[in-house]
Image (spheres, rainbow, N blue to C red):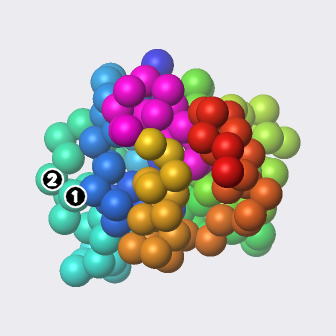
Amino acid sequence: MKVVSNSSVLISLSAIGQLDLLHKEFPEGVLIPRAVWQEVVATGQGRSGARQVASASWIQIVEISDSNLAAMLRADLDAGEAEALVLAREQQAATVLLDEKDARKVARKLGLSVLGTVGILIWAKRAGQIADLRSQLGVLQQEGKFRLSKALYLEALKTVGEQE
């Protein structure tokens, strides 16, 4: 199963020491466009995700072909988001990993299946890869500076049976 990631999921999971969850969920690896590599590794040097992504052999950089579509999408999205959506379409990826609301909306309009950082953590809890979701969400918000609405937080906990 092919999966394409944007920067945010890579950075957020790296910030909480859980980047390897992506490899466990997607053992065939994760594809990223050049713009995502640039954002996470080159521009993000010294920040969460840079070293982890650069050293992950299961993350593969793939160049996009449709630069016109990417340019059009950049009117509303950043370069990484735009290229991730284009790459997901070109690779006929089963899933695109995105957190940003606007990018998720565009992905759905393009007919792409979307999964975000919280969705990966829900999978990890259900698969026994993490002990509890509540603590991971707390670390994600504190260490990863991840903005999470109270409604999504509560819904995620409810989904895995950790209601407050």
Q: Is residue 120 magenta?
A: yes
The disc labelled 1 sits on which kind of residue? Gln
Q: Is residue 98 above or below residue 145?
A: above
Residue appearing at x 43%, y 24% in the figure: 127
Q: Which residue is mark 2?
A: 55
The disc labelled 2 sits on which kind of residue? Ser
Residue appearing at x 31%, y 24% in the figure: 27
How far across and how far down the image is residue 82, in percent? 63, 58
- Viewer-closest of 117 and 138: 138
3D distance between C-alphas at marks 1 and 2: 5 Å
Residue appearing at x 26%, y 67% in the figure: 50
How far across and how far down the image is residue 136, in percent? 44, 54
Q: Quadrant of residue 60?
A: top left
Q: Secondary structure at mark 1?
A: helix
- Viewer-closest of 143 and 22: 143
Mark 1 burial class by Cα count in 10 Å: few <14, some 14-19, many 20+: many
- Viewer-closest of 74 and 157: 157
Q: Is residue 103 magenta?
A: no
Q: Secondary structure at mark 2?
A: helix
Q: Is residue 148 left or right of residue 64?
A: right
The boundaries of the magenta stretch are 116-131
